[in-house]
Amino acid sequence: MNHVPGHTRIAQICTQTPGVTQRSLSLREAVSEYLGYLNTVSRRSPATISAYRADLRRLTTYLGQDIEDLHTLTPPLIERWMASMRHLSAATVRRSLNALSGLFRWAVRFGYATTNPVDLVDRPKKKRRIEPCPTRDEVAALLRAARGHAECAALLALATSGLRRSELLSLKWEDIDLGSRTMRIRGKGDKDRQVLIFEELLASLYAMRPDQGFPQSGSALRGRQGRPLQMSTLNRWLKCWLRRAGIIAPYTLHSLRRFAAKSWLDLGLNIRQVQLLLGHESLETTILYLNYSFEEIQRTAAKFSLHVALGDCL
């Protein structure tokens, strides 16, 4: 079987009629072509492609040899592969199945398979874990613990504008419009969105610019040596903020993004607006993302009075 280079194959399959079998593909060929498709056509993020590559490699390793025809992958075989992953977390197994399911959807679309066998496989149930979210007082304490304009701006970009860690690190001055108080963010899959700059972050950005010589372009967040901020530095900053603020809760940088989302709801934004600001493709993702713990509900309920809600009925 002659191998066709990935970019050539993608050009070919885009001209084929979906649903009509053109030729068979071995599993290894299908994985290679599918990952190329995700990169050049679907424009999925490098992190997603890397995770799917690892998941599909896990399947080829389990099989021990290449499969010459995708039809050989039957639901019972896939279930045995699942059983071999019992030592892994349910989330990892689900992601592996998602990767394989995506490969088969691609294969069915372009005629390399007729059905998706993963549809007939029961997936492990997902345990909903409510991630910790800091309170307003805790975020205020973290902000007091920050040192310098860059640290303050980084914290506020996460906690008020809801940036992801990778989005914060890739933020450039040319994407920041201080006049309109907006930032253009390149999120997952190179998808752009606009986010708001609230008053506190705006002040930090204005204060930070002179430190860098009033730049018009280049990385907005920089370390003390003037170099673009790295993930290791950002993680170290968070540990310092937590230690100085005396906070022992297991908060992460992502916890600050969740804080931003919940704060937007408190400000009166609806769930659809929160979804757009977060850059979620699915509204369901946003709803799950905003899971509230019982303690959070208690804190919110304590602010209200039944006498206020029911008026003269009491």
Image (cartoon, rainbow, N blue to C red):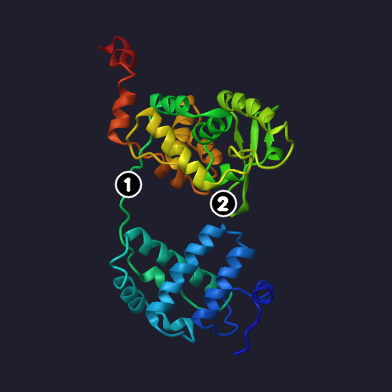
Residue drawn at point x = 33 percent, y = 71 percent: 82
Would you say residue 291 is visible in this rendering? yes
Residue drawn at point x = 41 percent, y = 72 percent: 58
Would you say residue 280 is visible in this rendering? no
Q: Is residue 303 above or below residue 157?
A: above
| Image quarter of the C terminus | top left
Left or right, 216 with respect to 34, comes to: right
Q: Secondary structure at mark 1?
A: loop
Question: Extreme top residue here?
Answer: 312
The kind of residue tagged 1 is Arg
Q: Earlier in the sequence, mark 1 or mark 2?
A: 1
Q: Position of residue 73 (x, y in %)?
A: 41, 80
Q: Quadrant of residue 254?
A: top left
Name the residue nearer the viewer: 48 or 281. 48
Q: Which residue was labeled with disc 2?
A: 188
Q: Position of residue 76 (x, y in %)?
A: 33, 78
Q: Secondary structure at mark 2?
A: helix
| Image quarter of the N terminus | bottom right
Residue drawn at point x = 45 percent, y = 47 percent: 285
What label sits on residue 129 in the rendered view?
1
